[in-house]
Image: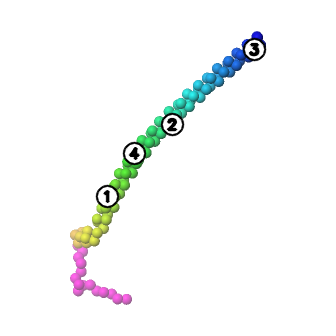
Amino acid sequence: MSAQAPTEQVNEQKFFWLLVLLVIAIIGSALSVIYAQHINRKSFTVLQALQLERDEMNIEWGQLQLEQSTFATHNVIERAARERLGMELPNQKDIEMLRP
């Protein structure tokens, strides 16, 4: 029996260190899950902010396109040519047709 007692003690010691190693692994795994969840929430918050900014830019782009189409109409261009540049439509007698 004395020969088995040191073997049992060695087995118990191995079991103890294995248990300690497993507890450390479980704690490390739990901390990894917590960290990953934190990063995930942070990334989701940034994603939502960027999506909101994208939506606001899309609205502004639509407004700018509407404004551009308004300024590109014939009446607006003609009015700007008259008021800003002092241009006028020529009289019929001042128009010359060139033929090749």
Q: Earlier in the sequence, mark 4 or mark 1?
A: 4
Marks 3 and 4 close (CB-CB < 8 Å): no
Numbered circles on residues, count: 4
> Marks 3 and 1, how far apart in space?
88 Å
The alpha-carbon separation of the residues under discs 3 and 4 comes to 67 Å
Q: Secondary structure at mark 3?
A: helix
Residue kind at label 4, given as amino acid type: Ala
Q: Earlier in the sequence, mark 3 or mark 4?
A: 3
- Assess disc 2: are there few (<14), some (14-19) or many (≥20) residues with their C-alpha within 10 Å of its C-alpha: few
Residue found at x 25% / y 70%:
75
Q: Secondary structure at mark 4?
A: helix
Q: Which residues are magenta?
A: 86-100
Q: Which residue is mark 2?
A: 36
Q: Earlier in the sequence, mark 3 or mark 1?
A: 3
Pointer 4 residue: 49
Residue type at tag 3: Gln
